[in-house]
Image (tube, rainbow, N blue to C red):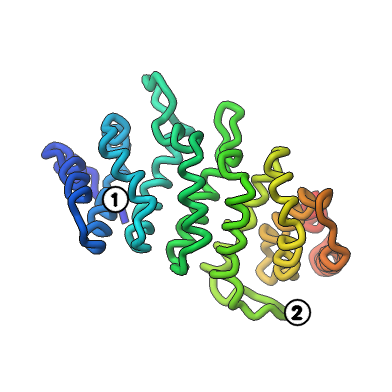
Amino acid sequence: MTAASAVVLFLMQYNGLEIFINTVQCSTNFRLTEILIGIIGNMCCEKSVRNALAEHKESQDTLLSLLSNPDPQTLVQLMRIVEHLAWDIVKPQETMPDKHWFEKQLESGVISLHLGFILSSSTSEELLNGVLVVLNTFCSMNFNDKDFSQYFASSELISAMLECWKQIFSSCHYEIEFEFPNKQLEKSAHNWVSILLAFTGHEEGRSSLGKFGDHLNDILQLWIVIPKDNSEILLTSIVRLLEGIVAYSFSAMVFSKVLKAVYVIVSEKGPFLSKSILN
């Protein structure tokens, strides 16, 4: 949901952002805080609001403090704001003399720390899915030759990703003809694999992944299936991720499943698609 530009302009004319932030600071009611952060999230669809936020350190500090909030629904709304901020980092204003304020938080490691804690401890699938979306957004960003996945490619966050997997995916019934029970789970699987795949783009990330190579092989082999919807995106990402960790952990069983999947795709869909997977 987004707020109409005219409504946002009206709220900003009467210091709406500051009023909502001040109310959040005083609030002890989770539902009130959730509603207010949701409203701010809607307002942040407008660039002018995010610019105002960039100039108001007290508001920044308030939002950052909410990363340790114990209420899942508040954090779900906060993730929407964080995702908006991500794109401002790679599309900075020409007049901005310094780094974006949120990029400084990324560099400090505080964002990775908080998101990792949520991934490892939350039982809310909605929140976990929201964090995966945010992480995938950051890990897919490149600006001025900077790979933003480097801010998250730690052993601690990868361990948290494995805990997240247990919470979201371990209840799936993994059979020979495995299918995700719904589109949301399939989307989350794409995000989960894409985040880890981004870590293979630099040595620190590959080294961190290598520490969990056996665990990753055990998980990824469950998802190596023949696509039924003409989409090889997930399978392609899995194969590329396996390639990134093969120097640290090799599984003959996983390698065999990949070969069988490629063989079936070649037989049914032609060599062009299989080549796209293996490249």
Q: Quadrant of the N terminus?
A: bottom left
Residue type highlighted by circle 1? Asn
Label 1 residue SS: helix
In the image, residue 151 above or below residue 240: above
Label placed on residue 61: none
Lateral position of residue 93 relative to residue 257, left or right:
left
For label 2, the crowd category at 10 Å Cα-Cα, with few meaning under 14, some 14 to 19 and many 20 or more, is few
Return the residue nearer the eye: 37 or 260. Answer: 37
In the image, residue 115 above or below residue 106: below
Gap in angstroms between the C-alphas marked 2 and 1: 43 Å
In the image, residue 40 above or below residue 96: below
Residue type highlighted by circle 2? Ile
Q: Quadrant of residue 45?
A: top left
Residue shown at the point (46%, 34%) measured from the top left:
103
For disc 2, the marked residue is 176
For disc 1, the marked residue is 42
